[in-house]
Image (cartoon, helix red, strand yellow):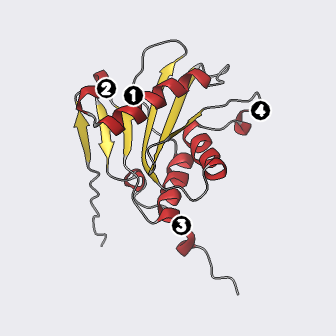
Amino acid sequence: MANTLNLTITADVLASEADLTPAEAATWQAAQAATETSHSPYSHFQVGAALLFDDGTVFQGSNQENAAYPSGLCAERTALFGAAVARPGRRIVGMAVAARPAGGAFGPANPCGACRQVMAEYEQRQQQAIPLLLPGPDGSIYRFGALSDLLPFGFDAKDLPKVR
């Protein structure tokens, strides 16, 4: 006989940008601005991500597409990988993602599975939750307490075999 496992994902649903703290608002606006650097000639879907560091600075990334489709990279991973190189040792204390059709209005968007995996591992690397802001419908904003909230059964180092 099978047992049922129920999962609950909790997020604050904010009515608008006016409900963000000043630091969140700066990160949110940086994610929106990052969509301007998107290279998305195939999907025409511009995605921006912004990371807030413990020193108050913000680092941005955007989706970068390639004619060999799997060779492109999502905004979330562009930001995280770039920050790891440009800002080694800095703690990430917040993240925001924004998306829109080319030149259009911002709207809902969620990180893909690969991005969720990478995002969860960055929390593990720094041993601290990273709050996340995602766009919801009708101008609302979802505030998650941790990136890993989006990946309840994530794969991490403890799942790998031990190497001698």
Whether pointer 2 and pointer 1 mark residues with C-beta atoms closer than 8 Å, the reply is: yes
In this rendering, which labeled residue sits more in front, label 4 or label 1? 1
Disc 3/disc 1 C-alpha distance (Å): 28 Å
Disc 2/disc 1 C-alpha distance (Å): 6 Å
Residue 86 vs residue 41, the one in the foreground: 86
Disc 3/disc 2 C-alpha distance (Å): 32 Å
**Residue at the spot of label 2:** 137
Whether pointer 3 and pointer 1 mark residues with C-beta atoms closer than 8 Å, the reply is: no
Disc 4/disc 1 C-alpha distance (Å): 26 Å
Image point (40%, 23%), residue name: 107
Disc 2/disc 4 C-alpha distance (Å): 32 Å
Residue 32 visible, this angle: yes
Disc 4/disc 3 C-alpha distance (Å): 28 Å
Q: From the viewer's perspective, is 73 left or right of 67?
A: left
| Residue 89, above or below 163 | above
Residue neighbourhood size for the residue with mark 3, other residues' Cα within 10 Å, grouped as few (<14), some (14–19), many (≥20): few
Q: From the viewer's perspective, is 147 left or right of 5?
A: right
**Residue at the spot of label 3:** 156
**Residue at the spot of label 1:** 108
Q: If the image is split into quadrants, where does the N terminus sit?
A: bottom left
- SS for dot 1: loop
Residue 48 vs residue 102, the one in the foreground: 48
Image point (42%, 15%), residue name: 105
Residue type indicated by callout 3: Asp
Residue neighbourhood size for the residue with mark 4, other residues' Cα within 10 Å, grouped as few (<14), some (14–19), many (≥20): few
Residue neighbourhood size for the residue with mark 1, other residues' Cα within 10 Å, grouped as few (<14), some (14–19), many (≥20): some
Q: Name the N-terminal-most of marks 3 and 2.
A: 2
Residue 16 visible, this angle: no
In this rendering, which labeled residue sits more in front, label 4 or label 3? 3
Residue type indicated by callout 4: Ala
**Residue at the spot of label 4:** 68
Image location (x, y in percent) of residue 106: 42, 20
